[in-house]
């Protein structure tokens, strides 16, 4: 999303540069980090925490090496990047967008324990961000609510939804005899694809024809392929692996489905809506803010394969209902998640915090 935002700002005569840490920059930083609200060394025995801290130090090293001119404002899209830039440029206003909960994803993916060292370290970052930032933003009301217990003034957390360039999405009139289901995500436990495979197995048991297209890669791919074979739906399921621009062929499918166990926003739902697909998702986080159940998509409880199968059955068996959901999803996405809307909201925020035209 960020490069598309940059294009819009350049056209409006704003000077904006993107800065990030290249993959080749590892273990260069040596400057000891100092946080204002907690002592990171309490969590320092964790290898995951050590990795975050080294990334923080590398960002500081790289920023001091590469950035030599002043800026009116910094807008960071990762907590580590934002805090590091504030260390290097303490007098420059910082706007920090938190796009997702790294700790929740790590817990759901079995990488860390709830209330363990890593969990406590990562949630401590929210309070630190509140102190060093002029404005903390997130991408959904539900995620702002999630962050509230970890900050002192939750009412100051702003919400600006992710914006998408609608010109990239071109709905295509088509008629698939066999309904085509698509999901796009990283193949990790948090995305709930095991639930989707069980739901699809139930569809097949009831005699429904369909094809499930899974776009994405990740550590669970082999396990999911094995589960598809075990459930006797491997012939109906296509694993594509990672694909750079799925929006280019997404409009040729019929139904987008992703039963995530947690989702701060769920950008891929907005992308599927702009492609004019019927949406089915879990009743969690930002997904539930995008989908009004029965109006522009269907919501199901996370982890409930039976409910997901029933929802899929509804849209597979009733093409007219499926079309109405897709059209409503397209209308809402164009009105609420357009790139122009996000850019306009950011312009106001930048001017408020000291950016100059």
Image: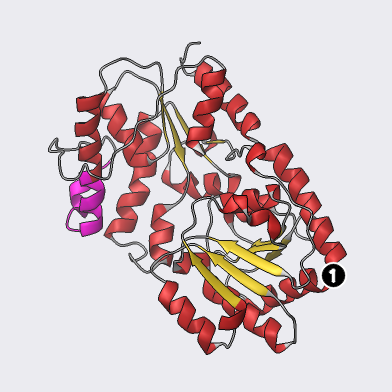
Where disc 1 sits, the SS reads loop
Residue 250 seen: yes
Q: Position of residue 138 (x, y in %)?
A: 51, 40
Q: How is the image coloured?
A: secondary structure
- Give the camera-side residue of 344 and 326: 326
Q: Nearer the viewer, residue 177 or 106?
A: 177
Q: Decide if residue 69 is on the left or right side of residue 16.
A: left
Q: How packed is label 1: few (under 14 Cα within 10 Å), some, or many (20 or more)?
A: few
Q: Quadrant of residue 63?
A: top left
Q: Is residue 13 above or below residue 279?
A: above
The residue at the far top in this view is: 357
Evaluate whether residue 266 shows in this view.
no
- Measured along the vertical axis of the image, is residue 121 above or below residue 336? below
Q: Is residue 18 above or below residue 222?
A: above
- The residue indicated by pointer 1 is 318
Viewer-proximal residue among 150 and 171: 171
Residue at the right extreme, as displayed? 320
Q: Position of residue 269 (x, y in %)?
A: 63, 53
Residue beneath the point at 46% across and 15% down: 355
Quick check: 351 left or right of 332? left
- x, y percent for residue 108: 43, 66
Q: Which residues are magenta?
A: 38-54
Q: Is residue 282 left or right of residue 16?
A: right
Q: Is residue 154 magenta?
A: no
> How many marks on residues?
1
The verdict on residue 46 being magenta is yes
Position of 298 compared to 188: left or right?
right
């Amino acid at each position: 999303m960020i490069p598309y935002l940059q294009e819009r700002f350049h056209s409006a005569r704003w000077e904006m540069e993107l800065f990030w840490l290249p993959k080749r920059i590892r273990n260069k930083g040596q400057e000891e980090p100092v946080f204002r609200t907690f002592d990171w060394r309490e969590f320092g025995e964790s290898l995951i925490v050590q990795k975050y801290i080294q990334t923080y130090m590398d960002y500081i090293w790289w920023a001091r090496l590469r950035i030599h001119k002043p800026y009116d404002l910094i807008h960071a899209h990762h907590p580590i990047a934002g805090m590091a830039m504030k260390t290097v440029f303490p007098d420059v206003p910082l706007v920090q967008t938190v796009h997702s909960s790294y700790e929740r994803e790590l817990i759901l993916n079995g990488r860390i324990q709830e209330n363990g060292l890593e969990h406590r370290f990562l949630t401590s970052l929210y309070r630190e961000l509140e102190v060093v930032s002029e404005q903390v933003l997130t991408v959904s009301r539900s995620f702002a609510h999630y962050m509230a217990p970890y900050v002192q003034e939750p009412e100051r957390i702003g919400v600006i939804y992710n914006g998408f360039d609608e010109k990239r999405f071109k709905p295509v009139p088509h008629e698939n005899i066999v309904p085509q289901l698509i999901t796009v995500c990283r193949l990790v436990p948090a995305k709930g694809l095991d639930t989707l495979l069980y739901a699809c197995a139930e569809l097949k048991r009831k005699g429904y024809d369909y094809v499930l297209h899974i776009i994405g890669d990740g550590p669970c791919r082999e396990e999911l392929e094995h589960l598809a074979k075990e459930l006797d739906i491997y012939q109906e399921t296509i694993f594509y692996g990672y694909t750079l621009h799925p929006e280019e062929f997404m409009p040729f499918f019929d139904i987008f489905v992703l039963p995530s166990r947690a989702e701060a926003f769920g950008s891929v739902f907005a992308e599927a809506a702009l492609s004019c697909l019927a949406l089915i998702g879990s009743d969690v986080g930002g997904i539930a803010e995008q989908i009004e159940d029965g109006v522009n998509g269907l919501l199901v409880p996370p982890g409930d394969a039976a409910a997901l199968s029933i929802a899929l059955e509804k849209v597979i068996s009733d093409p007219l209902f499926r079309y109405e959901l897709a059209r409503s999803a397209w209308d809402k996405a164009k009105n609420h998640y357009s790139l122009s809307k996000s850019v306009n909201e950011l312009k106001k925020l930048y001017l408020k915090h000291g950016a100059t035209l």
